[in-house]
Amino acid sequence: MNDIQKNIESNKHPIMGEYDFAPLSVPDMFFDAVKQYDDDNLLDFMGRKYSYNDVAQDVRKIAKALQEMGVKNGDRIGLFLPNVPHYVAAYYGAMAIGAIVVNFSPLYTVEELSHQVEDSGTRFLFTVNASALLPTALEVLEQSSLERLVVGTIEQALPPVKSILYRLFKRSEMSPIPVADNITHYFDLLQNDGEYYLTEFDPLKDIALLQYTGGTTGTPKGAMLSHQNITANARQINTLDPFAKMHNPVEPAKDKILGVLPFFHVFANACVLNRTINNGGSIHMLPRFDADQALDAIDKESITAMPGVPTMYQALLDNPKIDSIDFSSLRACISGGAPLSGDLKNKFEAKTGSRLIEGYGLTESSGVVSCNPYEGEGQVGSIGLPVPGTKIRLVDKEDHEKAAPKGGPGELTFAGPQVMQGYWNRPDADVEVFMGEYLRTGDVATVDDNGFIKIVDRIKDMISVGGFKVFPTQIEQVLCHHESVRETLVIGVPDDYLGERPKAFVVLENDANIGGDELKEWLNGELGKHERCVDVVIRDELPKTMIGKLDRKALRIQELG
């Protein structure tokens, strides 16, 4: 074992050295930044700028309002929101009083949202009056144990002129907010002096965020992320950035991050929101990714970094206006969520002059486990080096109690301050993934002599669709509800743009009379946008194991080789 491999087994980073990530709560991290950067810009939303003090004022008012409505330490507060200023204020406002934030994807169906609301015990749910969100939230309010909706309006977050134009021309995208005892307007929530009372909580043990994931099985589970998990990972990410204030505390280069990744996702939570606030930077927020808007922001707003998934970088390259964009401010872009091809990396760097570096993480790691270096030599096809404070081990794929064969691949496990506390109400699942302080990832990897990690296979069956994780068992469950379907398997197939897309294979009941296209149309109407299948293929039979179990691995080999 060489020095680098020994360092990986310790707390010392092969390149960055050793760091001490002292316990720190999320509200302490946020308000420390407010003290340092007070009137500096924190958010820019469609031309309206919010300083650190502006956001802090709303955070305090939300904290007080929630306390006045009976929210206590440990209560769950849900965010069913796109990238809007309401998200940032509600996120830190809930955590300021010791409540646990629960992130919900705006793509969720009523059934998905309702299930996770019930599983988490979410009391209040923040959303906005968008027609893609509010009707879903209202249905969940009716049919679940959810106590209250807090509904904001997008136009109130805009500059005055844009607010008027939004109301005039975007009416079809807005839903009226019903009047009801269990529905509160976000604006009304802010009508107080912000003098909330402080509660004590332990950053190392108390949970700040429930982030739902399929883990290694596909059944949604809430990863419990402590305050320390979140703040440590924000600091770990900043150790990698040569422009961060921890490397130059006197005159750090200012961040201006393009916030196009959805905040509800752990990648954006770590690399856009918390990491930027910890570094005193600003976030240029876009409600959703649009290549035209992203390029305009880079050009006109002097964006310094854009965390994203590979499909976003490909979309920028494919946009006809790219040759007219000034990329001189763009220092580095972090790619995650799906493998980054060498071809895309090379083309993006040649066109923009910015570094495009691949990293790796999972929900259970609060965001980031490893990343290629910002400066110096990285490795194409590698997920880089473990971030400081992170230890990794490769274990045998069949028997994880044993080390991986020397020189061979093994299942990647890791330990560090960013490792979750466990799964919400699922001690059985904890037993499956924890090996002492180490967490199993379900990914098979190799580590070279320089410490660079490469994912070579995955134990998990999940499908990565443009960075979103889709679990085939969930699609299969929906398909099996159709009266014509006897059995089904879903696998991921390559897609030039999204990386992978689900494809379903079905055996019909003997008396069924339905085609694959008709079944696909029905199925996709029952699924979230990112889950929709590229095809539904009718087969006479599906491969099975010797004991008669449907064999997804054999099907994948038949289809993909």
Image (cartoon, grey):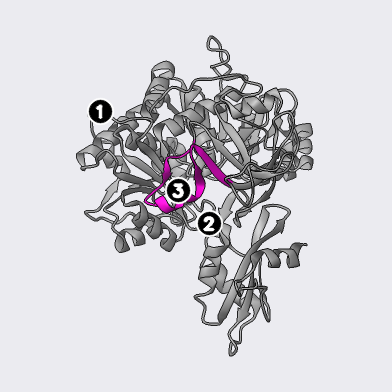
Q: How many labels does the image show?
A: 3
How far from the left and from the top, in percent, is residue 488? Answer: 60, 73
Q: Which of marks 2 and 3 is nearer the N terminus?
A: 2
Relative to 295, say whether 80 is above or below. Answer: below
The magenta span reads 419-441
Residues at circles 2 and 3 in contact by the CB criterion of under 8 Å: no
- Single out the mark in the foreground, 2 or 1: 2
Q: How crowded is mark 2: few (under 14 residues within 10 Å), some or many (20 or more)?
A: some
Q: Which residue is label 3 attached to?
A: 430
Q: Residue 198 carries which label?
A: 1
Whole-percent x, y for residue 310 in the image: 67, 44
Q: Which of 51 and 537 is in front in this view?
A: 537
Mark 3, secondary structure of its residue: helix
Quarter of the view holding residue 292: top right
**In the drawing, does residue 532 fall left or right of residue 445?**
left
Q: Which amino acid does label 2 sit on?
A: Thr
Q: Name the residue under label 2.
A: 217
Q: Which of 444 and 378 is in front in this view?
A: 444
Q: For residue 436: magenta? A: yes
Mark yes or no: residue 503 visible. no
Please name the residue shown 24% across and 40% down the image. 72
Query: Would residue 513 appear left or right of 561 to someone viewing this image?
Result: left
Q: Which residue lies furthest to the bottom in this view?
A: 511
